[in-house]
Image (cartoon, coloured by chain):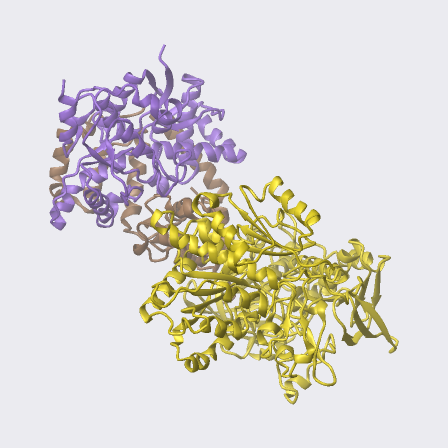
Chain colours: A brown, B yellow, C purple
Amino acid sequence: MSGERYRNSFLREVEHNVEEGHWVKMCMQCGVCSGSCPFGPHWAHPPQELFMMIRAGKREEVLGSDAMWMCTSCYNCVVRCPRKLPITHIMHGLANYAHRLGLAPKNQPTRQFAKMFWDNLSKTGRVNELKLSLGLYFKDGFKQGIRNALAMKDIGLGMLKAKRLNPLELVKPHACKGAKDIHAILAKAKEIEDRRKGLSA
Amino acid sequence: MAETKTAAYICQGCGIGERLSTRQLAQIAQKEGKMALVREHPFLCGAEGVGLIRDDIEREAVTHVLIAACSRRAKTEAFHFPTVALARANLREGVLWSQPEADEAAGLTQEMANDYVRMGCAELKKTKLPLGNPLAATNRRILVVGGGVSGLTAALEAARAGYQVVLVEKERALGGWAAKLHKRVPFREPHADPADTGIEQLIAQVTGHPRIRVHLGATLLETRGAPGRFSVQVSVESGAAVTEEVGSIVQATGFTLYDAGKLPALGYGKTPDVVDQAGLERLARQAAAAGGAIRRPSDGAEVGSVVFVQCAGQRDEGGSHLPYCSGHCCATSIKQAMYFKDANPEVDTVVIYTDLRVPGSGEDFYRSAQRKGVTFTKGRVASVEPASGGCKVSFRDLILDEDVALEADLVVLATGQVPNSGVNIELADDDPAKAAQVPILNLAYRQGKDMPQLKHGFTDSHFICFPYETRRTGIYAAGPVRRPMDMAQAVEDATGAALKAIQAVENAAAGRAAHPRSGDLSYPIVRIEGCTQCKRCTVECPFGAIDEDESRFPVFNESRCRRCGTCMGACPVRVIGFENYSVDTVGAQIKAVDMPDEFSEKPRVLLLACENDAYPALDMAALQRRVYSAFVRVIPVRCLGSVNTIWITDALNSGYDGVMLMGCKHGEDYQCHFVKGSELANYRMGKIDDTLKQLGLETERVATYEVAITDVARVARLIDDYVAKILEIGLSPMKGFA
Amino acid sequence: MAKKEYAFYPGCSSQLKASAANYLTSTRSLCRVLDIKLTEIPDWNCCGASIGYAEGGELPRLALNARNFALAESHLPGQDIVATCAACWLSARETKERLDASAELMRETNEALAAAGLHYKGEVAVRHMVEVLIEDFGYEALAQPVVKPLAGIKFAGYVGCQTNRPFGIAGESFENPMYLDKMVETVGGEAVTGYDQKVTCCGGALAFSEAEKSQKQIRDIVESAYDHGADMIVTPCPLCQANVEIYQSEINKKQGTKFHMPVLYYSQLMTVAYGGSAREAGLDGQLIRAEKLEEIAAKG
């Protein structure tokens, strides 16, 4: 195993395939990112450590980790990093790459929600907040969904009353007229990106 | 010389005239101070005021001038009268700005000013105009010892400034460490790639310079003399001895790499594939000469992976190896990793460090290496062992917190710099370690053959205030011999030391002090008939300025002397003094103070303040209008080392209630301008308790403090606290006996 | 003609009957007063938000934003795009900067847009409504129309993350931006000082997937507002507003707290101060009613 360790093979893979991955080698291991993260205590491997793991060639451990799924996109690490690494984007990129390869943890809730969110928005071009919340409640099955929805019903009713949630979204959602255009654009973009990274569709 | 005529000038400017009765001050100067001429002036430092003093000097034949105005540290250019003896009474910072403005404080404030005028008059009458060293020696040639980057630079800089230079190099070629390098760490924007060493050009500039004479394969047999008149015996390549007369010396003898042979755990000596940084430079030069890749020493295979072990035998807390960081080695390893990456990006290069130290632009160089794909891993290497086809490096990854083993074709150990300092003169003559050391300067000084060493064997240098300055006046240390450093720093160091060497010869030629009292014309005068040959002055002089003659009388080498007065403080029979700073000039001031009686409830505290740190701190406190007790009377001293204990006993005998001494930090991280002065004072005052007991006084009546120039708030607080303590223990029972 | 015109990008949450509908209502109201004409980018689409990364990847998200740019360029030429939502602004501005910096990404993005017959020339500017107010108008001009200063109300200026990092408002620090406090003072309110959760993350989209961890953040944000004597929280971000307002009841339920801290948009404060009604300020859209503000709005 020591043969591949601390060689640059995984680092090169990350540089090539992960959004902003070429920055990973520039980390100087100061740990400011780890100390600045609002969810820091919940990370199995804070960003600084993930960067070192990448450099140490720990491919499976990195891509299989749920660490980067803890990123709330608050950008605190980004503005504080003395090396100006776009850490938030690298975390997104790693998560996306792991997800794309099917190596990310299966039931990771943020992974599930993120996928649901994208599917939701790409359908009509705009987010359907009602469907998104219902989808979230029902992700673990119908019964659990009813339980979840009931638990949150006060909030839901409050939002309805405040006219900030529309039950009609279920039947007549906000939508872009050019939804088809959007599908075409997204399909094309994905195709180009996969081609660039050498991933099959 | 003309007859003595004294004059006192009392300034009324800066508010002095409003808050003090200058009339009263003038009367004191006249009646008590016996000044022949007394004048008050509304704005003494102005052109008209200065003109008035000049006129008096010219027309009235005034020979001694007292300026009662601001601190002696202020308006020095306006009050510069080189033909007369001068004293200053500090009314502005010392009284006005440090005392409260309230009406009820006016009485004590005036008393304080009155005393400072009395003290000024007393000092002036004991002061003579310094006339300079009559033995001025005028050789302005500069000797540079060592022909590496530091020595070559020092030689070239001095020669370009117009000075003749002699350069002595022990090897038979110039260039030192730099000549052994493939490339150097970059020192210019963009700090991205290894740069040419430039050493050939530097050597050519030195050897081609008409003012530089070079001795190769040469060593120093003996160095004797003083600034402006050193005489150096040089053993040259032919074996002959030649004498070189020079005015000052730069020692730039560089360093040797720590012996990697002492690091068997890191594989050195077990396989040729573990090398030190010099070893890698050799491999890189061989590769460059052959026009190919760097090859593994064991079998000549191209290196595909290399590991750099930082801090090898350095920063060792265990006491077996070097305890310090050599500073350059991180950047050097980065450079060496680039040798591989620049030739072939596919080579794996891993730098294992605990703290990567690349100060300044080294950070850009570090980033450049990261961009090139050099892997940096925070870790601690446990062992390097030979393995099939290379080496196995076992280390603890400190970020991932796990033990890892890594294989590499080649391992480079970043060992540290060991200074080429010559003999450690502190060691006893029968110490076997000393016998093994080869002297470099071979000084014919009573203190030993080489310069003192400061720490870890590095040659002396006043590292806080005056780099390059050593305790041997006229001899300057430059480059890694005085502290670990890289090539760019060595160049800067050498330039600074060359300038110091120039300053030394110029001052010596003019009969002035070299530094830090640069330009001071006063020098120690000994009443030799009173000397008891006790040798304290010769032993305690921090600069080895005093030798002994056959009958053990002190022989002063004035141009080696820094004019600190440590000898004056040491002398038990008080036969040493300067024209304008002596046992009498200070003693007279102490006695001039008007001493209130024991029922007055007005204590008097004498404060002897080092003029380098404590006195400026007092001035700055005044500038910030920090109020302190009106019971203190401050006398600046050149260094606490110059304080003679007679002043303390005189003060206590004449009724002072306490004596404060403020000097610089001493000990290992000393800040004393004169290195040992404050330490000696502290030692001497440690013994004053006996005297106090004999007088029947409390030990608190003499207190010593370390004060830095930045202790502005503290200095006022110290005074107030001390006065409070004196009031607590009560006024001195000695009052009224004087 | 209006004083200023912008290509408006309201974003998914700031549509009618969406979670930040009151942001939209109050923004429209304050723009009327300042004579700002906002024209919606025709058929604008979602920005992808940050959370879109997992499934969306890089180029699809860039293309999504570039579609809006292309539409703005052709339909509203010369107008700056103005977003009210922090996430919309961030995604759009990030896209712009990345495309500006990389010819390759620009080419690829346009290749994707071409699938719908669109092309992005790279000319738009992307700005947040707060930038427009501060930079194009300035605090002094914003103070001019104030007719009902919000005297006596203490606001905790909760800036949150995405209007502050990584871009932020020019001249502000990331650790302690002052613009929101200044806006509060501009409309006559009192900005509490030392509000130490000013730039704390509310959990963002992870409020849904990591509810417990996010609610700890939200608790800190609300608690500190109480500690510093605030009557209400004010924010420029729809997700911050929603998370911090909506989950107070949850936190109360689970942790026995008694949080009841109104959370408003700066635009609501401005609308009330400019003399707008509670309805015009979208105060009817609060889950936790901002009674003190309603009182001022109701005054003649």
Q: Looking at the picture, does residue C266 appear above or below residue B478? A: above
Q: Residue furthest front?
A: B31
Q: Position of residue A55 (x, y in %)?
A: 48, 57
B605 sits left or right of B60 in the view? left
Which sits in the foreground, A49 or B621? B621
Please state which of residues B535 and B697 is positioned toward the viewer in this rendering.
B697
Q: Position of residue C56 (x, y in %)?
A: 37, 39
- Name the residue furthest top: C1
Give residue B641's quadrant in the image.
bottom right
Residue C60 versus residue B96: which sits nearer the camera?
B96
- Residue A198 versus residue C139 in the image, above or below: below
The reply, left or right, for residue B252 in relation to residue B604 is: right
Q: Position of residue B500 (x, y in %)?
A: 69, 60
Examine the rendering and report whether any part of residue B588 can be seen: yes
Residue closer to the observer: C74 or B624 = B624
Relative vertical location of residue C23 with respect to residue C255 in this rendering, above or below: above
Residue in the picture at 58% in, 48% down:
B75
Residue positioned 53% across, 46% down in the render: B11
Which quadrant would the N terminus of chain B be assigned to in this image? bottom right
* Total number of numbered discs in the rendering: 0
Residue B413 in picture, x, y percent from top left = 60, 70
Q: Is residue B501 left or right of residue C79?
A: right
Q: Is residue C62 left or right of residue C223?
A: right
At 49% across and 78% down in the image, what residue appears? B318
Residue A47: in sight, yes or no? no
Picture quadrant where residue C79 is located? top left
